[in-house]
Amino acid sequence: MKHYEVLFILKPTLTEEEVNAKLEFVKEVLAKNGAEIETIVPMGTRKLAYKIKKYERGTYFVIYFKAPPKLIAELERVLRITEEIIRFLIVKYENKKEIAAWEKLSHGIKQSKKEIKPLDTPEIQ
């Protein structure tokens, strides 16, 4: 099984019940096709960088999961035809470094920033 992340944005006009129903729908699609859901991260309603289908805001969700590669085509098909989802992105984590990052992200551990060494600049007098 491969490691994946799916981010999707729902229309901001949906009620709380409709948002929960769409989240359950996506979880159901994943479960029916053999995925193991690790974590679901609700990111709330945010302003979009640019208008998408005349919407300036959207409700974001990220789901971390493990699944066989054949699931991705079906997930993509379902997300495309779901009217309430205005955008989505599926990311595959492949090498050991990426999978380690996936493990941290799926458990809510933030990535540490690499140390930035200052440049050696001569003093100006």
Image (spheres, grey):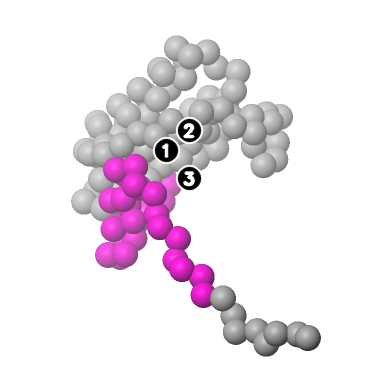
Answer with mark 2 or mark 1, whichever residue precedes in sequence.
2
Residue highlighted by disc 3 = 89
Q: Is residue 92 left or right of residue 18?
A: left
Residue highlighted by disc 2 = 43
Q: Is residue 29 magenta?
A: no
| Residue beneath the point at 50% across and 40% down | 88
Q: Secondary structure at mark 3?
A: strand
The amino acid type, in three-letter code, at marker 1 is Val
The answer to whether residue 85 is visible is no
Answer with mark 2 or mark 3, whichever residue precedes in sequence.
2
Residue highlighted by disc 1 = 62
Q: Which residues are magenta?
A: 90-117
The amino acid type, in three-letter code, at marker 2 is Met
| Residue beneath the point at 29% across and 43% down | 107
| Residue beneath the point at 32% across and 29% down | 27
Pair 2/3: label in front:
2
CA distance for labels 1 and 3: 9 Å
Residue 29: x and y in percent read 32, 30
CA distance for labels 2 and 1: 7 Å
Q: Is residue 110 left or right of residue 71?
A: right
Q: How many marks?
A: 3
CA distance for labels 2 and 3: 15 Å
Q: Are marks 2 and 1 in contact (CB under 8 Å)?
A: yes
Above or below — where is 32 with respect to 125? above
